Image: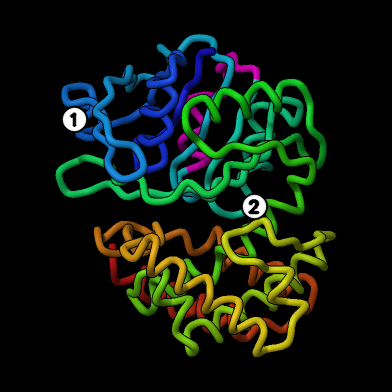
C-alpha cells in the first residue's frame, strides 16, 4: 500500500517510520531543514519503538503521484495551506490525526466525503532537540467511516496500522468519537499551556483537575447541542465525568493522573511542546471554535472562556 504522510512533526515521523518498518510504501511530505535532516539521517525513534528508519522524503507535492492513503498530521491552523497543493492528488482515502473537529469538513471540501475517513489518534510523541522523536503513548488509533460505519477499507487500514505496531481499532461511531476526544483533550491542551505542567500532574492535582472537569462538562453541553452523544473514547472519560458527581469525577481524573505519573511521567501535551519552542498554538481552531458554538447555541461556558482568554494571551506573546 502506498501511503503519503503529510507533516514531519512527532506524529508524522512516528507513523512514517512505523509504517515503513512494516513494509508499506511510505512517502513523507516535509519541508525546510526538517526535510533535509530526515533525508540525510533517517527517522530515529526512542521510547515505545527503538529504531532508526530510512523513509522516502518528498518536498514537492506535485511529485507525489497516486496513493492509497493520505494521512494529514500538521497543526490545525496549517490545514488549508497544506491541502491547497494537494487538490488534484489521486488518492483513495484520506484521514487526519489532528486535534479538533474541523478537520473532516476541511478534508471533505478538498477530496470529497466519500474519500474522507474519521480518525481518533490517542498516540503521542515529541521531537527532541537532536531531531529524533520519542514515542511516548500508543493508546488507541480509531478508524471509521463518517459519520458512522465500518467498511472493508476501514478493516484493511486498521490491519495495516496494527501490523506497523500502532494500536489501531475500527470504530463504528466516529462522529461521536471524534467529538468525545475533543471534549476530553481540550482542557488538557489549555491547562498544559497555562500551568506548564506535565499531563500527569495536571490530572492528579485537585485544583487543575477540578478546572478540567468544569471545562469538560461545558464542552459536552456544547457537543450535545451539536447532536453528539458524548462517550468515553477520548483521553479522559468524558461521559463518565459528566454523568458522575463532582467527587467521583475528581477521583476518576486523579486516578488517571497517577497512572500517567507512573507510566509516562514526562508526557507533555503537544501544545506545551509548541509553547516551549515558541511556536504558534492551536487556539482559534479549538477553544475559539468552542466559544463560537457556545455563542451559537447561547450556552454559558465560563471555564472555557477564561481558558481561551488566557491561552490566547500567552500565544500572542509567544511567537
**Secondary structure of residue under mark 2:** loop
Q: Position of residue 234 (x, y in %)?
A: 62, 58
Q: Is residue 314 above or below residue 284?
A: below
> Sequence-wise, which precedes: disc 1 or disc 2?
1
Measure the alpha-carbon separation of dots 1 and 2: 32 Å
Q: Is the residue marked by circle 1 packed among few (<14), some (14-19), or many (20+) residues within 10 Å? A: few
Q: Position of residue 108 (x, y in %)?
A: 69, 34
Question: In the image, is residue 124 part of the stretch drawn in magenta?
Answer: no
Residue drawn where x is 20% and y is 34% of the image: 33
Q: Quadrant of the C terminus?
A: bottom left
Query: Does the magenta segment cover residue 86?
Result: yes
Q: Is residue 66 above or below residue 211?
A: above
Q: How are the residues colored?
A: rainbow
Left or right? Give the position of 31 relative to 162.
Answer: left
* Residue range of the region highlighted in magenta in the rendering: 79-92
Residue at which label 1 appears: 37
**Residue 316 at what x, y percent from top left?**
35, 70
Whether residue 61 is visible, yes or no, is no
What mark, if any, has residue 155 been given in the picture? none
Of 42 and 163, which appears nearest the observer? 163
Report the residue marked by disc 2.
101
Task: Name the image quarter holding the N terminus.
Answer: top right
Whether residue 306 appears in this view of the structure is yes
- For image coordinates 33% across by 17% down, the residue present is 56
210 relative to 24, above or below: below
Amino acid at each position: 500500500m502506498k501511503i503519503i504522510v503529510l507533516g514531519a512533526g512527532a506524529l508524522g515521523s512516528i507513523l512514517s517510520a512505523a509504517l515503513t518498518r512494516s513494509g508499506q510504501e511510505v512517502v513523507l511530505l516535509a519541508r525546510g531543514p526538517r526535510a533535509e535532516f530526515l533525508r540525510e539521517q533517517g527517522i530515529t525513534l526512542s521510547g515505545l519503538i527503538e529504531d532508526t528508519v530510512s523513509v522516502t522524503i518528498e518536498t514537492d507535492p506535485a511529485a507525489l503521484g497516486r496513493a492509497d492513503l493520505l494521512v494529514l498530521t500538521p497543526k490545525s491552523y496549517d490545514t488549508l495551506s497544506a491541502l491547497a497543493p494537494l487538490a488534484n492528488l489521486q488518492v483513495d482515502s484520506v484521514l487526519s490525526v489532528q486535534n479538533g473537529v474541523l478537520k473532516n469538513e476541511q478534508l471533505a471540501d478538498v477530496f470529497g466525503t466519500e474519500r474522507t475517513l474519521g480518525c481518533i489518534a490517542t498516540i503521542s510523541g515529541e521531537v527532541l532537540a537532536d531531531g529524533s522523536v520519542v514515542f511516548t503513548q500508543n493508546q488507541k488509533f480509531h478508524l471509521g467511516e463518517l459519520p458512522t460505519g465500518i467498511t472493508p477499507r476501514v478493516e484493511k487500514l486498521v490491519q495495516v496500522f496494527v501490523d506497523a505496531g500502532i494500536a489501531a481499532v475500527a470504530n463504528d461511531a466516529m462522529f461521536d468519537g471524534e467529538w468525545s476526544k475533543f471534549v476530553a483533550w481540550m482542557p488538557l491542551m489549555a491547562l498544559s499551556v497555562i500551568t506548564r505542567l506535565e499531563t500527569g500532574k495536571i490530572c492528579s492535582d485537585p485544583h487543575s483537575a477540578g478546572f478540567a472537569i468544569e471545562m469538560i462538562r461545558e464542552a459536552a453541553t456544547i457537543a450535545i447541542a451539536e447532536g453528539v452523544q458524548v462517550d468515553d473514547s477520548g483521553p479522559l472519560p468524558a461521559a463518565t465525568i459528566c454523568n458522575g458527581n463532582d467527587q467521583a469525577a475528581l477521583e476518576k481524573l486523579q486516578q488517571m493522573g497517577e497512572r500517567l505519573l507512573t507510566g509516562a511521567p514526562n508526557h507533555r501535551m503537544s501544545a506545551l511542546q509548541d509553547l516551549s519552542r515558541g511556536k504558534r498554538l492551536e487556539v482559534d481552531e479549538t477553544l475559539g471554535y468552542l466559544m463560537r458554538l457556545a455563542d451559537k447555541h447561547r450556552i454559558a461556558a465560563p471555564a472555557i472562556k477564561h481558558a481561551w482568554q488566557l491561552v490566547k494571551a500567552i500565544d500572542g506573546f509567544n511567537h
